[in-house]
Image (spheres, coloured by chain):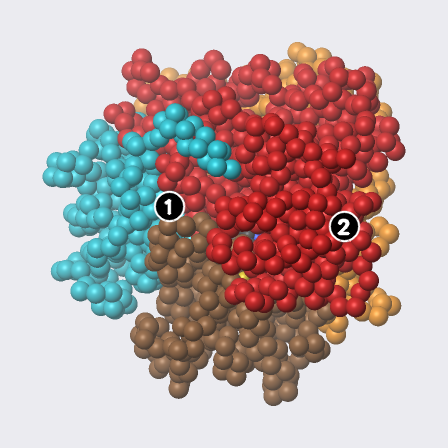
Chain colours: A brown, B orange, C red, D cyan
């Protein structure tokens, strides 16, 4: 694993953790984007919440911001607005993005913020030792719900489809090639890309068997949102791949037009001039 | 004899154009070479209720409105009731005779505001214009002069001019030229609100992007900057919540933008986790805290200084914080730029603490834009084998580089090594703690070189105050003819103790808008100077200079 | 000679059962009539890395672990490297010979932990049992005694017993009865963690419902209370966020439940807006703040006292806040109940500030449950024509009534009149401010009647400290044979200045786990007592008593 | 309007504001519940966010908690858990519940918390003078978006349907009788009831004409979620009434069973006893 996209930080994921698959697929995706699409790694900026998933920030030798639990998608939007030329990826946990910080996820989708969110969806708060999350099944026993979770899980893909995400996909950490493909497409997509990665947590929610037996690659995205919604309801088989993709105006262009705040900053003299003329009128 | 000090109050329901009338009155006085202070009192509602604007002016640099008015224009009954005791001796009450049939009003001039306005569309909205017409007559302006003012200050000029002329004619017989105001040849200074001052100052200092969620009384910053985003070439975003705002601001700052947020207490409270992030990640961000009476939702549209403790101690854990509070619109302008530079220099969070009274009041300012600071962080200029975001340096300040960049730049909320990767090593944890503590020392050294405390006056008893209450105190001293020294710390955290050495044998009077005397406690805690008397106001209203002068005299 | 003080360290990867081994070792010592202090050092990861448990015991009431051990069982190479310098003279290192082939270990006893464990399923998980077996042999327990312990303390007893016997046999030749420990006939005291102490104390005091979102090191409270919700007949909920938790807790409290929340700095920061709400609505709520090294995400699984300023000043606006910090597990138990009562009495927010070191360490406690306070707010007993939630009373405390009720009860975040309806009236705003300020005065009067400061020792130099650092100091004094007086304020806000009058001519040594010396600053600010020396530790690790004794001697 | 459900607080809504319709319909609903269903007004507890909508708290002479901007639904859930016998209603603004505090709305729906949320959906932040909200149309000009809102609005009913609300309805403040009916049904429904009330804001977003011309009463709820989703997509006509209703286990029973924390509180002695026996084992 010691390649030039990997830092010197000791990797402390549990042996067998699904996060390794996400890590490897993501590195592959970065290399493919460099080779095939001329997107340099300097231009790929990452952010992460707090949790097992978020350790990927320390392992990837890419620039960015190790944010707060639940806030990585807000951080990411700030980064994007600062310099729309950058490709921004937020790594998020299911606790992180569907619990603590779900408002940022919903609003990033609603705005069609041009960024990619990768959910390490292990159905559990891994790093805080196994409590239930918004995607844990009802009845899930964790240390905060020893008698079983009293809540139904959410369907993240559906949530994203109704709130306006323009790229909605599911991956499985155990299917490296397919996951790499999805990451590449997500990062190339202009608009809000959402990838829900099924990620077994060997310590608290080992879903390898389940997913290995159920996961099935979609042949193509759904033709429209309704069809995509129906795909998300399947439980016999679990489709992976791109469920839905659409083109739509992106937020930073709606807000800023073509102006790039980093590159096209006003000089001090321009600022003083405009203030002077406003003061003259006041 | 020409009047030096003149106060005009316009009162009416929300939606009657009263706030606008206050601004136009200010314009009229400014045109006469006078200096103006205008305070708006409005409720947390959109239409109805009772709004009023108090506009005091003089030929000297006046620093407060006065609650005793020479001329009150009460466009409804409620305004009359509210202000009938607010007349100076010789003061005149112009009241709406439609609303107060059969009442005998001493010193009153009745006008059928309602009846006359009904002749026009949107009649309600015009009452403020009527107040201006009455003012014009009272200070002896001609109808032509009034027409000019209305044309330059209002839309729908035709109807407004006609309406104004009717009112003018109605009041003129009793009111014309009752007051002769002293004029001056001084240059006409622009009249701006505190929110405009802070906004412009921040832009002058280098603000690139502003993120804010609306909350009274901080919203005027959002509205002003959003309205002028294109003039200034800055970005302005109103996101889903305060938490989003501050985290976006910090995200954008990590890319090299100079960012700012603003809110009132409740919204700022939601930003605390991210303030601590700014401290750890060493990403600069400036927050404008506009206070209103608290705790909690409190009284949204009024003023208070109850957030001091809160402002000084935001965010968990130990890291350098910078808090400053301006006393006037001019100081607010320069301080906003200076604070933007301070947070950039020390790569941390800064809070500009201010009050509704400063943010929403308006006064003339004499500003030299060239004198503003320009925010310039210490940038990395090469030399290391590998860029180290958190390089351990002597003063704790690690040079910045912003992505996208050739080298990797890692910002983080975790404790970290120099490169920015998480660490649990006891040695590294201690080193990074010390690094941030060294920044605090460097910050104090820097503040020692700066102007951190204002001292007004050279002799007489000592008064400590801060924020916009300083203006109230200064005006009180003037109107009460009191000689005193007024000491106002601009910087409150780190607290400039060194500047207080000179006062350590004295017992000041402490004036603040707080019930528990938080500022007095701060002074005592930090300097061990004990107040000999406390003057506190906490009913949501700013001090009236005459009342305050009285209170000061009582404790002198 | 029988040993008085004995320290055992078990080290290995996360997931090897090391934390459990610490607890079982504690059980063994307790059964010998000894008193135990156990500290767990673990990283922010689930498997791998390096965990260790330090278990110190003695026949006196020991108050800290010691970092120099008599017996180290290093189940992997990393543990060996970490602890090889942590042996007392005469100390023995039991190491995993599979992991350290061909190495010469002075004072070492090699065991093929890995090879032997491989014979069993879940081999990794058993290493902790192996550490216990080595301990048993070293202190001369028989195989039968060991079997009994394992049967009572572990599941899957059969395999664990077999494994333990193999290890016992392997180490016995070199290790058997190397240490003879002093025993006592004292009654066997229960051994509990700080989180258990706080949880039980709160339940004893009347806790009805607990709302919390997990965050290290506060999560153990959530886990313990959720696990025992049915035993205690209380409600426990883990909602979507800390903001939800505190607002639900306040909502439930407005219906008359005694509620509590807990978090660490970052999560607590998100609750600030609601703390201020508690102050305004006068709805009681107790918050447990478990500190870890900050700022921001910091170092999740380690300890620090960097949140003091933050804890003392939470929430915007002015209202009474109560903050207290216990020094030991026993005090934590009683204080949790007392604080629950305090917030109910004064209808405001209280914070019990503590550290990872207290929350997650374990020690024996001698608790008399009958001595706990029972939370009892002042209830409305009729007499008014209409119930007034915010009745203006002499001490500012308005009797409570909870809905559903015959009369209407209105809680609110806005400034309000006595009934609870929003007000913008200057008179009412001032009155309600004064009412809340009077509660602060009543609170101070109440604290003056209470035991708010612990003073340990009667002669010798003066040491100020607080929180669980007090235990480190007390143990340091004992092991260093130092006579000193130790002063520990239990209540930190309002600060019990009156108790410090007696020390005002002295210059204490201040000991705390902080880089900037926030506690020292607090002491100076509030009492004007200046430290003659500061001992600070801020590497995430608690003090070691021997090192601390050394540091104290150096500055005496 | 001075009846026994109205307090002495001065009403400061703008003349003509849609909030009056909600206020009147709600009072009617309370009276009907008292008369027809034996639900006493003492048992109906209210909470509200902060905004024009929230002033209803001060005007209604009912017990409850005037909460924080965006937190009323969290407050409400705490109240319900404290005493499941109470009927809890949260009044919320669109800025409030779809912006600042959307996470609480989503989780209350997900949990099927047994309470009613009434959204005063005026498409604007009224009390803070007219900024755009999550339901304002793209291009909406307010003081924070003088050049037009750069975001698409959300569809609140859809959001509720995918997150698990068991009663989803829309009302119009201008149709008193229908609104009263919906409120009565919502409050009688066991589970999470969501009522999105179209509410014209005469000062900042006057939609009277639009709604008066488009609003149409549904003859009956949809048979299933899919059908309800389609109903929410209609724009030619704006259906009002109950879109969807279903029975499902409610949160407080999942968590607490039949235990009522207020009524069935453990005594001090019971508590001390259980602690003693735990300490004996420790
Ligand atoms: C504000 C805040 N609350 C709580 C925490 C504690 N915390 C750290 S990670 C985590 C859960 C992470 O779960 P998830 O996002 O699913 O990530 P995973 O560990 O499963 O990858 C929590 C609650 C925190 N760091 N910050
Ligand atoms: C934490 C917080 N942020 C901001 C505010 C300011 N604020 C008060 S009301 C309001 C908007 C209300 O909009 P909405 O919920 O749609 O209610 P409406 O006034 O339209 O009824 C805002 C932003 C606040 N009170 N608290
Ligand atoms: S706890 Fe689960 S998610 Fe975390 S590293 Fe281990 S296997 Fe992976
Ligand atoms: S501003 Fe709009 S919502 Fe608020 S009271 Fe006026 S009309 Fe109603
Ligand atoms: Mg997870
Ligand atoms: Mg609204």
- Please give the label number shown on residue D73: 1
Q: Nearer the viewer, residue D48 or B81?
A: D48
Please tell me whether mark 2 or mark 1 is closer to you in this view: 2
- Mark 2, Cα crowd under 10 Å, few <14 / some 14-19 / many 20+, is many
Q: Secondary structure at mark 1?
A: helix
Q: Quadrant of residue C36?
A: top right
Residue at image location 50% in from the left, 45% down from the top: C152
Q: Are marks 2 and 1 in contact (CB under 8 Å)?
A: no
Please tell me whether residue B14 is drawn above or below residue B480 in the rendered image.
below
Q: x and y percent of residue D218 in the render?
A: 17, 60
Q: Quadrant of residue D67?
A: top left
Q: Which residue is mark 2?
A: C92
Q: Nearer the viewer, residue C330 or C253?
A: C330
Please tell me whether residue A258 is drawn above or below residue D38 in the rendered image.
below
Q: x and y percent of residue B61 in the render?
A: 70, 33
Quarter of the picture holding the N terminus of chain A: bottom right
């Amino acid at each position: 694993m010691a390649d030039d996209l990997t830092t010197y930080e000791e990797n402390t994921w549990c042996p067998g953790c699904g996060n390794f698959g996400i890590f490897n697929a993501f590195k592959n995706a970065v290399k493919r984007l460099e080779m095939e699409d001329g997107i340099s790694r300097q231009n790929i900026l990452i952010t992460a919440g707090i949790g097992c998933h978020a350790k990927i920030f320390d392992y990837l030798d890419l620039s960015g911001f190790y944010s707060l639990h639940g806030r990585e998608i807000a951080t990411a939007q700030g980064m994007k607005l600062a310099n729309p030329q950058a490709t921004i990826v937020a790594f998020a946990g299911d606790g992180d993005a569907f619990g603590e910080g779900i408002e940022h996820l919903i609003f990033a989708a609603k705005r069609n913020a041009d960024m990619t969110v990768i959910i390490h969806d292990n159905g559990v708060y891994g790093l805080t030792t196994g409590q239930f999350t918004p995607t844990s099944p009802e009845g899930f026993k964790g240390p905060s719900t020893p008698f079983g979770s009293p809540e139904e899980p959410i369907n993240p893909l559906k949530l994203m489809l109704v709130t306006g995400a323009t790229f909605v996909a599911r991956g499985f950490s155990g299917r490296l090639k397919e996951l790499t493909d999805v990451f590449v497409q997500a990062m190339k997509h202009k608009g809000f890309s959402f990838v829900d990665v099924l990620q077994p947590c060997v310590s608290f929610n080992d879903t390898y068997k389940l997913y290995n037996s159920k996961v099935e690659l979609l042949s193509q995205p759904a033709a429209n949102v309704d069809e995509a919604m129906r795909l998300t309801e399947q439980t016999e088989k679990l489709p992976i791949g791109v469920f839905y993709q659409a083109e739509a105006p992106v937020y930073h262009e709606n807000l800023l037009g073509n102006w790039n705040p980093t590159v096209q900053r006003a000089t001090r003299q321009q600022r003083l001039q405009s203030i002077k003329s406003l003061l003259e009128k006041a | 004899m020409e009047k030096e000090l003149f106060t005009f109050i316009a009162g009416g329901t929300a939606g009657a154009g009263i706030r606008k009338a206050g601004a136009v009155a200010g314009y009229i006085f400014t045109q006469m070479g006078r200096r103006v202070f205008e305070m708006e009192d409005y409720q947390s509602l959109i239409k109805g209720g009772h709004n009023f604007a108090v506009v005091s002016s003089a030929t000297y640099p006046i620093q407060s409105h006065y609650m005793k008015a020479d001329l009150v224009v009460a466009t409804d009954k409620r305004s009359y009731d509210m202000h009938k005791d607010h007349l100076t001796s010789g003061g005149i009450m112009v009241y709406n005779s439609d609303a107060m049939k059969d009442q005998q009003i001493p010193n009153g001039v009745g006008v059928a505001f309602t009846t006359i306005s009904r002749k026009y569309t949107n009649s309600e909205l015009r009452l403020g214009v009527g107040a201006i017409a009455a003012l014009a007559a009272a200070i002896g302006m001609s109808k032509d002069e009034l027409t000019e003012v209305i044309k330059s200050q209002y839309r729908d000029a035709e109807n407004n001019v006609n309406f104004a002329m009717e009112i003018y004619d109605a009041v003129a017989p009793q009111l014309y030229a009752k007051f002769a105001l002293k004029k001056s040849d001084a240059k006409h200074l622009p009249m701006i609100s505190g929110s405009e001052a802070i906004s412009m100052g921040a832009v002058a200092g280098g603000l690139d992007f502003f993120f804010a969620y609306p909350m009274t009384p901080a919203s005027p910053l959002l509205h002003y900057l959003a309205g002028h985003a294109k003039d200034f070439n800055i970005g302005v975003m109103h996101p889903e919540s305060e938490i989003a705002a501050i985290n976006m601001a910090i995200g954008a700052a990590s890319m090299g933008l100079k960012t700012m947020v603003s809110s009132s207490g409740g919204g700022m409270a939601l930003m605390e986790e991210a303030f601590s992030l700014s401290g750890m990640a060493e990403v600069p961000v400036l927050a404008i805290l506009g206070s209103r009476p608290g705790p909690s939702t409190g009284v949204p549209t009024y003023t208070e200084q109850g957030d001091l403790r809160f402002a000084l101690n935001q965010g968990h854990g130990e890291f350098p914080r910078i808090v400053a509070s301006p006393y006037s619109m001019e100081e607010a302008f320069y301080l906003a730029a200076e604070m933007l530079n301070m947070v950039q220099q020390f790569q941390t969070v800064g809070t500009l603490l201010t009050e509704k009274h400063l943010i929403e009041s308006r006064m003339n300012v004499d500003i030299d834009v060239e004198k503003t600071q320009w925010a310039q962080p210490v940038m990395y200029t090469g030399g290391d084998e590998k860029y180290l975001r958190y390089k351990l340096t002597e003063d704790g300040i690690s040079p910045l580089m912003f992505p996208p960049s050739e080298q990797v730049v890692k910002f983080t909320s975790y404790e970290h090594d120099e490169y920015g990767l998480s660490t649990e090593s006891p040695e590294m944890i201690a080193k990074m703690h010390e690094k941030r503590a060294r920044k605090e020392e460097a910050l104090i050294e820097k503040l020692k070189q700066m102007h951190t405390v204002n001292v007004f006056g050279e002799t007489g008893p000592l008064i400590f105050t801060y924020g916009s209450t300083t203006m109230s105190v200064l005006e009180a001293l003037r109107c009460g003819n009191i000689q005193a020294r007024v000491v106002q710390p601009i910087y409150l955290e780190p607290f400039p103790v060194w500047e207080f050495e000179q006062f350590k044998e004295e017992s000041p009077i402490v004036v603040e808008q707080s019930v528990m005397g938080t500022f007095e406690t701060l002074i005592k805690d930090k300097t061990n100077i004990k107040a000999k008397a406390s003057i506190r106001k906490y009913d949501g209203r700013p001090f009236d200079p005459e009342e305050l002068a009285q209170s000061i005299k009582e404790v002198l």
